[in-house]
Image (cartoon, rainbow, N blue to C red):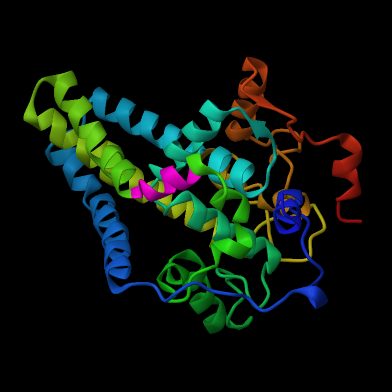
Amino acid sequence: MTPATATLLDKTPTPDHLQPAIPVEDRQARWEQIALALFIIVPLGAVVAAIPVLWGWGIGWHDVILAFVMYAITGHGITIGFHRYFTHGSFKAKRPLRVGLAIAGTMAIEGPVIRWVADHRRHHAYSDRDGDPHSPWRYGETFGALCKGLFHAHIGWLFDIEQTNPRRFAPDLLNDRDIVRVSRQFPLWVAVSLLGPAVVGGLWSWSLTGALTAFFWASLVRVAVLHHVTWSINSICHTWGERPFATRDRSVNVWWLAALSMGESWHNLHHADPTCARHGVLRGQLDTSAELIRMFEGLGWAYDVRWPSRERIEARRVA
């Protein structure tokens, strides 16, 4: 293991005065920007059309179940896999779980795993300062600047031409053959994520209508909702909410996003203690991602889990 990889796996932020200039990859290709726009606009259009479709055409139990299952699988693939495991090393995982988490997260259609992790590690290295790829405070603190910043943090940053350099921010993943393979297979898992529900829905109802409604609800609507929930962690969870823990940035807890985000919206604690496997550490804070990690640990699939201790939590509280 190289010193650079060991530093990343330790996930300890570098002091501000030691931060080097941010290297970037080649400029984003035009086709990538067009594809990204389609993945944003088409699912969002599906959400806008949801109400008339619900009343005029209908929705069956198979659509609800498929949408829920796909949301849970792909959402936890992001929160447990891409975020807590690959980015921050909150636990260690045996190979089948590691590969499974990479695939599940990829099916959320938020980009290849290596690019996602590199972007998020860069976010933590420069959180809410120059270099952060998606800070809502990028343009200042006036109302107009914050509105512009929120749009940038929520969606706009995805269209930045300059890309985070994975050789700096994710060298450990570049050295993992399994993860490199899954990252390169991104188009395949996008197709599975979008078309899989339609196939299951059609076979379940044994009708073309069942396939179409499943594609609408469990593919388009599910992707749109999950995308905006994920992006809300970048925008809303760095703007308005509670700050019970001391951090060097403006991360906050947003309680009403907890269920949809599977515990990710307890974002203030996460920035106070990035490697912690549980984000909802206070009484009553729902964190389904942490509960699944505990289940994986009980099954022997995950180990060396970094659970929070009372002393560690109290040490990070705002005085």
Which residues fall within the magenta stretch?
179-186
Q: Is residue 39 magenta?
A: no
Q: Residue at x 70, y 54 (%)?
A: 5
Report whether 9 appears left or right of 301.
Answer: right
In the image, residue 302 sits, relative to residue 138, either above or below, namely above
Query: Which quadrant of the structure image shows residue 282?
Result: top right
Report whether 235 appears left or right of 206.
Answer: right
Res. 240 visible in picture? no
Q: Residue at x 53, y 74 (%)?
A: 24
Query: Which quadrant of the structure image shows residue 242?
Result: bottom right
Compare residues 226 and 19 and report the one nearer the observer.
19
Give the residue furthest to the top.
299
Q: Residue at x 35, y 46 (%)?
A: 185
Res. 226 visible in picture? yes
Give how far across and how far down residue 148 sits, in percent.
49, 78
In the image, residue 162 sits, relative to residue 200, either above or below, namely below
In the image, residue 83 sits, relative to residue 171, either above or below, namely above
Give the residue furthest to the front.
1
Magenta span main SS: helix
